[in-house]
Each structure stands twice: as C-alpha cells, then as structure tokens.
C-alpha cells in the first residue's frame, strides 16, 4: 500500500508540499527575525526621540530607553512562560486577565473625570490599560466565540458581548482616548468576523459601537477641539495644532534620505510628547522617506507572516489560534497605522503610541507579549503540534 504523504504549506506560495520536500515551515524563525529587527531598531529610535525629553523631565538621558528595555525583558520572560503553559490553561487565562484589565480600564476612566478643577483619581497614569485591555479582549473572544457559535441558545452570550463592548467603548472614550476606542472596535469586530459568526451580529456589533463612539466624540468639547486642531493646524492656536504643525514640518524636512539618526531638531522641546505619540515625526525627520518605507515594509511582512499563521491554523482546525493570531497582529499593525495617521494629520485623531518605537514602557510590554503569543501560534500552525500539552 502506498504510504500517505503528510503535507505542509510553503510560506509564500501557499502550495502543498510533501514531507520529503519540506521538513517544516520557516515562518516562526522568519517571524522572530522580523520582530527582533523591529524591536531593536525601535529601541534605537526610542532613545533618539526620548533622550532630550528625559533630561527635560529631570531624569538621566537613557531613562525612557531603560524603561522600554526593562518592560521588554519582562515581556520576554512572561512570553516564555506562556509558550510552555499547557494549552488548556493558556486558553483560560482570560478568566483572570480580562477582569483585571477591565478594573484598570475603569480606574483609568475615573482618573479623567473632573470634580470642579480636581480630577476624581488624580495621579492615576493615563492610557496604561488600553493596550492590555485590547489584548485580554482578544484572548476572551478567541475562547468564547468558538463555544457559542454552534449552540442554539446563544442570545444571552450575544447580549453580554454587546454590553461589555459598549461599556468598554464608553470607558475608553472617557479616558480621553477616542483613537483607542477605534482600535478596540475594529480589533474586536475582526475577531467576531473571523470566527464566522452571523453576519447580522457582526453588523450590529460594529454599528452600535460606532454609533456610541460618534455620540461620545460629538458630546466632548476636548475631542472636537482635537479633531479641528488636527484638521486645520495652521488656523487654530492650540497646543494640539502646534504639535501637529511642527510634526508635519519635521516630516517634510526629512525629505528622501533624512538628517541621520539623532539629528532631529523638532524633538528638542518643540513637540510635546514627541517620544510617544509623535515618534513617527522623529523617524521621518531622521531617516527620511527611505527609512519610513523600510519600516512600513517590515510591519507588513510582520502582518503577512501572522496572516499565514492564521490561515494555517484554520486549515488544521485550530480555530482558537486562527482567531487569536489574526486579531493580535491586526492590533499591532492597525495601531501602527493609526499612530502614523495621527502624527501626519491624515486622520483627525488624538495621538497613540507606535508599536516597538514609542517610549511607552507598558505599551512596549504588551507589544512584545503579543509577539510571544503570535510566535506560539505560528510554531503550532507550522509544525502541527503544540509543545505545551494540556
């Protein structure tokens, strides 16, 4: 009898190969290389964009770089633990992480509520919970959607997901971060769509969340001021408009080849929060169009590898990691695009950290942690086995 050939898939052609022709996919190794390039080069640009801000804030010149490195090492350690966590326990981690992130989100929102001239929770760090909350939402949806998809009575589950998503959109908007609200809406919508839920559920999920989001933006004076400042930075005299105007000037002065790493002028006190929300302006000024195009290409290669992992997982019947890998990769890529769009005033959005490149320790931690989860998904999908058995 003829021996059955175990098939695998090539990284780039999507063609089938026999086991004799292809011993295993190179996607996990390629992904590690791409992630390492983005992470290490991101640290270089983090230092370049943040050393002056560190000195002005009264710290050592390497303060924000050290913060990112520390959080990055912590994320790698946590990622290694997650890689070897038994599958059953890994999938149920959201039972602990999602409530924790939701509590952080509530505190973050309450810290932006003002009682007269005093904030309700003065001193609670802004935006510390948004990325972590989106990560735990992805873990939750990847687990729950598969368990309600084939059940006849899932109305309560739908209502619960609707309610939690609307509350989350409200809390994110209340945190003065409507850009993170957009990121949350589209990331969770992608997870629902990829899980192949009913189209009407996906449609109404997006519709209700976007409706609430638009209502909250239109009812907020600060959000409207931000939108108009981004749309017309030359005609409105606000800090937001000035930051946008300087950012556009920095990008235009970068030209084709850039001024060289460390040679940015506009990061020297002209742009507020340049090391975080406006880091793309520094990248464009120092590296020019060529450097920007190269970084964008690495981001899209990153997403391509994750998309391939999602497709592999789906072909092999592993819907959990299929949903999770496409959702987490979309979170990173869409966040990078939103950060670029905000810094360049292509969209009238408030600023948002750029994955790998911004001087934001906790955001860097979440990004590296997501990459470690994506690596596990890629390793399983390319080899067909999970090293960490339940």
Image (cartoon, rainbow, N blue to C red):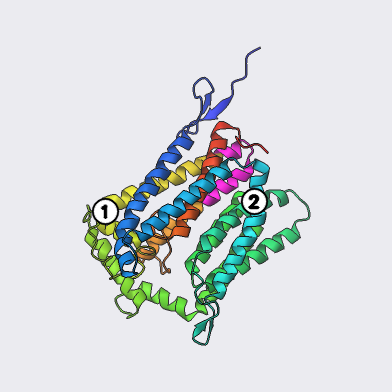
Relative to 377, is 356 above or below? below
Real-space Cα distance between discs 2 and 1? 41 Å
Q: How would you classify the magenta stretch by its main secondary structure?
A: helix
Q: Are marks 2 and 1 in contact (CB under 8 Å)?
A: no
Looking at the image, which residue is at 59% across and 70% down?
106
Along the line of sight, the residue nearer the viewer: 346 or 388: 388
Q: Residue furthest right?
A: 153
Instruction: Kindly tell me whether residue 213 is visible in this rendering.
Output: no
Crowd rating for badge 1 (residues with CA inside 10 Å; few <14, some 14–19, many 20+): many
Q: Which residue is mark 2?
A: 93
Locate residue 34: give its quadrant.
Answer: top left
Residue that label 1 marks: 287
Percent position of residue 221, x then y? 47, 81
**Closer to the N terminus: mark 2 or mark 1?**
2
Numbered disc in front, either 2 or 1: 2
Q: Is residue 232 above or below residue 259?
A: below
x%, y% of residue 24? 51, 28
Q: Quadrant of the C terminus?
A: top right
Could you tell whether 361 is left or right of 210 in the image? left
Please identify the residue farthest to the top as the structure is shown: 1
* Residue numbers of the magenta segment: 312-328
Q: Nearer the viewer, residue 58 or 7?
A: 58
């Amino acid at each position: 009898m003829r021996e059955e050939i175990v098939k695998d898939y090539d990284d780039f052609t999507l063609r089938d190969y026999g086991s004799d022709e292809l011993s295993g996919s190179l996607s996990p190794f390629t992904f590690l290389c791409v992630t390492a390039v983005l992470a290490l080069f991101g640290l270089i640009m983090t230092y370049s964009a943040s050393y002056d801000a560190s000195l002005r804030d009264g710290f050592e010149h390497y303060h924000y770089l050290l913060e990112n490195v520390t959080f990055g090492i912590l994320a790698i350690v946590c990622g290694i633990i997650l890689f070897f966590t038994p599958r059953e326990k890994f999938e149920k981690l959201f039972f602990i992480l999602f409530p924790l992130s939701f509590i952080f989100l509530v505190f973050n929102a309450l810290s932006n509520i003002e009682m007269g001239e005093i904030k309700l929770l003065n001193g609670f760090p802004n935006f510390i919970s948004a990325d972590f909350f989106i990560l735990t939402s992805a873990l939750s949806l990847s687990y729950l959607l598969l368990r309600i998809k084939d059940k006849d009575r899932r109305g309560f589950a739908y209502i619960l997901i609707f309610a939690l998503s609307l509350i989350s959109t409200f809390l994110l908007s209340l945190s003065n971060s409507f850009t993170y609200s957009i990121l949350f809406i589209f990331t969770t919508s992608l997870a629902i769509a990829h899980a192949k839920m009913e189209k009407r559920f996906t449609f109404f999920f997006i519709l209700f969340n976007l409706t609430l989001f638009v209502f909250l933006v239109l009812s907020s004076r600060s959000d409207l001021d931000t939108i108009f400042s981004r749309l017309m930075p030359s005609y409105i005299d606000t800090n937001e408009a000035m930051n946008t105007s300087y950012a556009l000037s920095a990008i235009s002065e970068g030209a084709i080849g850039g001024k060289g790493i460390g040679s940015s002028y506009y990061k020297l006190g002209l742009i507020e929060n340049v090391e975080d929300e406006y880091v793309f302006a520094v990248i464009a000024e120092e590296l020019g169009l060529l450097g920007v195009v190269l970084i964008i290409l690495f981001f899209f290669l990153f997403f391509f590898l994750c998309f391939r992992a999602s497709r592999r997982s789906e072909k092999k019947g592993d819907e959990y990691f299929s949903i999770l890998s496409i959702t987490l990769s979309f979170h990173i890529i869409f966040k990078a695009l939103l950060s670029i769009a905000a810094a360049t005033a292509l969209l009238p959005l408030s600023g948002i950290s750029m994955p790998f490149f911004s001087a934001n320790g906790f955001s860097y931690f979440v990004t590296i942690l997501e990459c470690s989860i994506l690596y596990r998904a890629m390793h399983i999908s390319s080899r067909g086995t999970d090293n960490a058995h339940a």
